[in-house]
Amino acid sequence: MARRGYDLFGEAVAREGADTGFFIMGGPSNDAINACISQGIRMIDVRHEQAAAMMANAYARVRAKPGFCIAASGPGTINFTTGLAHALVDCAPVVAFGGAAPISQYARGAFQEIDQLAIMKPVTKFAERVYDPKRIPEYVARAFRMAMSGKPGPVYLDLPGDVLYADVDDDAAIEAPAPRHVPRPVADAEAVCELVDMLRSAQRPILVTGSGIIWSGASHALQRLVDVAGIPFYTTPQGRGVIPEDHPLCFVQARSTAFKEADLVIVVGTRLNYVVSYGEPPRFSPDAKLVRIDIDAAEIDSSLRLGLGIVGDAREVLNQVVTELKKGEPLRFPAWSERLSATEQAKLPKHEAQLATDQVPIHPLRLCKEVRDFVDRDTILCVDGQEILNYGRQSIPSYLPGHRLNSGPFGTMGVGLPFGVGAKAAMPASKVVVLHGDGSFGLNAMEIDTAIRHKLPLLIIISLNGGWTADPDQKKPGRNLGYTRFDLMGEAFGCYGEYVEEPSAIRPALERAAAAVAAGRTAIVNVVTDWRARSGTANFTNYST
């Protein structure tokens, strides 16, 4: 008995435990998509392929497992690239499949023929083409494994039409190995002892962690270390919520002080990129000892200065450190914690006063305050934009791993709504709130239609400041976009819509919108904010030589 290559594909994807995929129909992928559906996989058709890759990214972050997407040949597959590049820089395990022109017609000008593999290699961790239909199960299994192995990242598999539609005898297909647990390498015992000695000699240690904690499932291990050793902790934007941010050793408002004054900086599961000023002075003390714990040895080797590098899985290494610490006298750093707490308490009144402003037009910080006070602790929050992204980072805490999604270190605008759809698809019972800038919302606004058609109700809040970023001097070219009535646009799709111009009207509008979401409708609250308000953050770019 023979089966088609696309049947093998659907079976292979299901064997990997995938339950949801994102796609746009088109040849030669249609029957591969049908094969997934026949295996019980929920396939969500979207309005742009870049959004499909972004949705798969959100699904992966919320579920801590690979998300997948599939597209038609040529332009459809190429549209994945923005979403995959974002996933690459984000270290997110997205598995992308692209239909392709038939191998038998290569170099003859076949319909939508282009070297998709060459295009995908720079934006993925691994990219390959299937030439033999018998090997489809093998390659699909490899794609899912590679997405999660070591440092996670996106993987691409090219599926030519004549491979998908070839007949394969049952006894000829190469059976892929059953899914298995990702290996978790432990650290060298001597390195763990050296780190514990460094901790016992330190007076002002801090932990800086990233999304590697999420992929490793290391949240509990990290909190054990914080509690056992009494070490203040900070996370990158992508790693927020791994420990609740109302933990007594989380001093958000004292971040700059902690970075500058720490004498031991332990970096776990994150890169030393521009987000943390590369771990260099003046943001960090030149005298501070730097320790890096990462599953990727090459990442550790990239450090310009390094006191100790430990290669291993974050969860395993953190558990090793806790075990070693418990062999000696308990650690505590009361003077250091009191110093950071005092800094925090000194800054909070001014911070809260800024949040509570009643100015009109509404200040974005006031909008963030209303969102902060409205959402539940377990709400999944997706934030996308420029000013609203930075203001949201400063003012809205997170409490659970994988429940805070944003534009990431690649700074990709347009991810907010696709992230919301992907997160809701991953956890349908959870509340999902998307906080968008008006410019970023416009990039993938048609995914409202995806949310509605697939009954994935979201609460979408738009900071409508009339354009791209704040520009008090009006010198930025193409800055002004006008004040679009996105609420009315949403109503045309069947959303519940509200338009807000007064600070006191924000909370009632959110409550009415949330009631609509609870009844199964996507809702848009369009809030007019001050176009002059510019968030104060560290300079991310420096174009001078």
Image (spheres, rainbow, N blue to C red):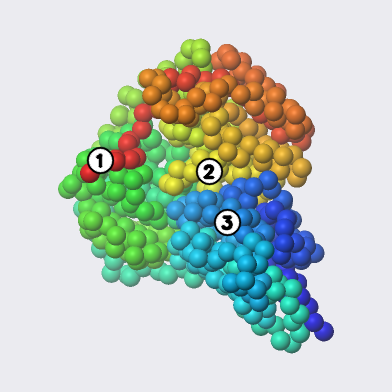
Residue 490 locus on image (x, y percent):
70, 30
Question: Label 2: which residue?
Answer: 405
Instruction: List the single residue furthest toward the bottom.
Output: 171
Question: Label 3: which residue?
Answer: 78
Q: Between residues 224 and 164, which one lies in front from this camera angle?
A: 164
Question: Label 1: which residue?
Answer: 544
Q: Amino acid at mark 3?
A: Ile
Q: Amino acid at mark 1?
A: Ser
Residue 217 locus on image (x, y percent):
51, 57
As drawn, the label of residue 518 is none
Q: How busy is the neighbourhood of tag 1: few (under 14 within 10 Å), some, or many (20 plus)?
A: few
- Measured along the vertical axis of the image, is residue 14 above or below residue 79? below
The quadrant in which residue 150 appears is bottom left
- Measured along the vertical axis of the image, is residue 211 above or below residue 504? below
Task: Tell me how far mark 2 sits from mark 1, CA to CA.
Answer: 31 Å
Question: In the displayed structure, does residue 215 sit left or right of residue 282?
Answer: right
- Kind of element beneath mark 3: helix
